Amino acid sequence: MSALFNFQSLLQVILLLICTCTYLHSTAPALLDNRKSGAWGVFWKFARIGERLSPYVAIGCFVMAFNILSS
């Protein structure tokens, strides 16, 4: 089943994108710039969400990990 049709898988993909984009932005800031358009601009927005909402993203990652381990 595709991640688009399974809500738990969709949340996993979104959390992984947020964490990956935040890490890439912290290591190579020129790679994800706010002036880019298209997919790179969306990845920059994911990085911004990860930077500003990092405690909530971390809690979401822990909840998702325990959910995966328990199933």
Image: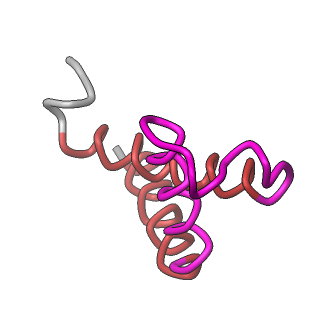
Front in this rendered view, residue 40 or 17: 40
Front in this rendered view, residue 71 or 15: 15
Which quadrant holds the N terminus? top left
Q: Residue furthest top?
A: 1
Please tell me in which quadrant of the rendered image residue 51 appears. bottom right
Q: Which residues are magenta?
A: 26-53
* Colouring: secondary structure
Using the image, determine if residue 15 lies above or below residue 39: below
Please tell me in which quadrant of the rendered image residue 7 appears. top left
Using the image, determine if residue 66 lies above or below residue 43: below
The residue at 27%/29% (across/down) is 3
Determine whether, in the image, residue 21 is placed left or right of residue 38: right
Using the image, determine if residue 65 lies above or below residue 2: below
Residue 21, percent from left and from top:
62, 49
Determine whether, in the image, residue 50 is placed left or right of residue 68: right
Residue 53, percent from left and from top:
51, 79
The count of marks equals 0
The residue at 56%/71% (across/down) is 58
The residue at 42%/57% (across/down) is 64
Please tell me in which quadrant of the rendered image residue 34 appears. bottom right
Q: Residue furthest right?
A: 27
Residue 27 magenta: yes
